[in-house]
Image (spheres, grey):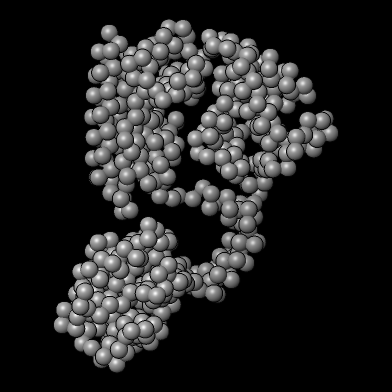
Amino acid sequence: MVRGTCNNRRNNSLDIENAKQLSYENMRKIYKTHLRGQGLGKNTVNTVSGDTFYLWNNVGQDEFWRVVTSDDFDTVARKALFVALSKKSSGNVMSLVNGYVSTLRRFRNYVYSDESHIEEEPDNAIALKDFLLDIECLDPLAEWTSKFNLFDILKITKTEIRHSNMLSWLLNPNENHGLSDSIIRGFIQYVATTFPEDTDVFDTLLMDCHDFTLQREWHNIDILAVSSNEKFVLCIENKIYSGEHDNQLDRYRKIIEDTYPDYEKMYIFLSPEGIEASDPDYWCSMSYQEVLRIIENARKKVKLLPDVELLINNYIEAIRRDIVGDERLVQICAEIYAKHKKALDLIFENRPDRASEVADILKAWAITKTENGDIEVVLDKCSKSYIRFKTKVMSDILPDAEEENSGWNTKNHYFYEIRNNEGTGFLMSLTLSSRNLTDEERNICDKINEHFPSRQQKANWQWRTPFATKQVKLDEELSEDKIFEQLDKKLVELKAFEGKLQKAMM
């Protein structure tokens, strides 16, 4: 609902005043979240959010808010955008004005609607203060948080592949866990008694399980156990935080049938709740609650070595807490959350995560290269998503301006950026800013674009990317040495680009 009247503006004045205090980055982030909530695609969100803040980037923050909050919005917006665009574009300025007014009106409707929730900063501080004054509310969690758990230390409690590794070790009757064949026998008994179709239950339950060999990720199958003597195959697909895809269960079954045509076969689809498989005629659904039962029963029957006992007990605790769910723990957490929802949401939103870990590694590499004289990292322009740096070659091609008026509020109108894709991968690129370019600087950017054209070719461009590497995908297990090695390779590509650019600019 559009709110353009004076009364409506007064009703929303608190949010507007809060919004005016936000930085460009924070305001755009909030608006992008709103746009994504409207079902817009990633590229559309980036384009719309960029065009929305054209006045902010090219004229200033005060002018942007003067236009947005004007009672005569359409007239004021058209005049302001016509003046700004006329300085930057040689194309059909009036048609550009229409487009920019439309995107700015959309933003105005948002900030004057019931959908905008731009909180007062003091409220956040008060919520955190109240939480800290009541920090004793966390004491009931000590039963779970104060215990040593190896899986927590290694940060693998919620990593599917590590659970499959642990289960493979436990299932192997010849491993050094001291449980003999009790785990694999427990899995086989579960299938034989709950999924008895076409299975000779007595022969299956009485077979010798000691010659089973275990394989991980054979033809992408999570766990495969094969007994040559008994001519028996147990195939397990483990799904904790992901679902089936690409008809994989049917494909895996056909691979097993082709490879072991004369063997007895069992297929288990393992998940936290024991959800039904897409191919229920062949795949027996099994929950992690059953896994717990089998491991705990096996553990009670033998005396384990202290280190093995510690490992298995830690694994049982991790399953119960993070996969199956501890009802008492859930209730305590729900009570604490209900009492301090705002503070806990704020902490969660700003928590260190995988993206933060990767950002720290990327930043450490940039600092090292700066110390070696290879690049010049600008730390106050770095964030979790972007590590920004300059080079001597690029600064010679596009020298700094006299004033800090680029799109980053810097004298330099370019940055090399290492883009951190939520901790899953990264790429290296060169980005140019058009904000407040002189004619000479614009000519340089245009010449760069002639030789290394950016995908963004609008006449009134704000940002251009004449160079970008391919994305490097990161392994589940982060290795600083490997990431440094990949970054070094991308830097070599960057230097090669600069060599070509230097020749082209002569």
Residue 160 coordinates in the image, percent (x, y):
36, 63
Query: Which residue is at the front of the view, 382 or 80?
Result: 80
Asked where in the image residue 489 lies, by quadrant, the reply is top left
Regarding residue 151, the answer to whether it shows in the image is no
Residue in view at x 28 percent, y 80 percent: 184
Asked where in the image residue 415 lies, by quadrant, the reply is top left
Residue in view at x 58 percent, y 23 percent: 54
Regarding residue 187, the answer to whether it shows in the image is yes
Horizontal relation, residue 417 to residue 347: left or right: left
Please count the marks in the image.
0
Residue 221 coordinates in the image, percent (x, y):
29, 65
Residue 363 coordinates in the image, percent (x, y):
36, 37
Q: Is residue 201 above or below residue 358?
A: below
Horizontal relation, residue 278 to residue 217: left or right: right
Query: Which residue is at the front of the view, 433 or 457?
Result: 457
Residue in view at x 54 percent, y 11 percent: 91
Looking at this view, name the residue that lies furthest to the right. Answer: 7
Residue 444 coordinates in the image, percent (x, y):
39, 11
Residue in view at x 25 percent, y 24 percent: 495
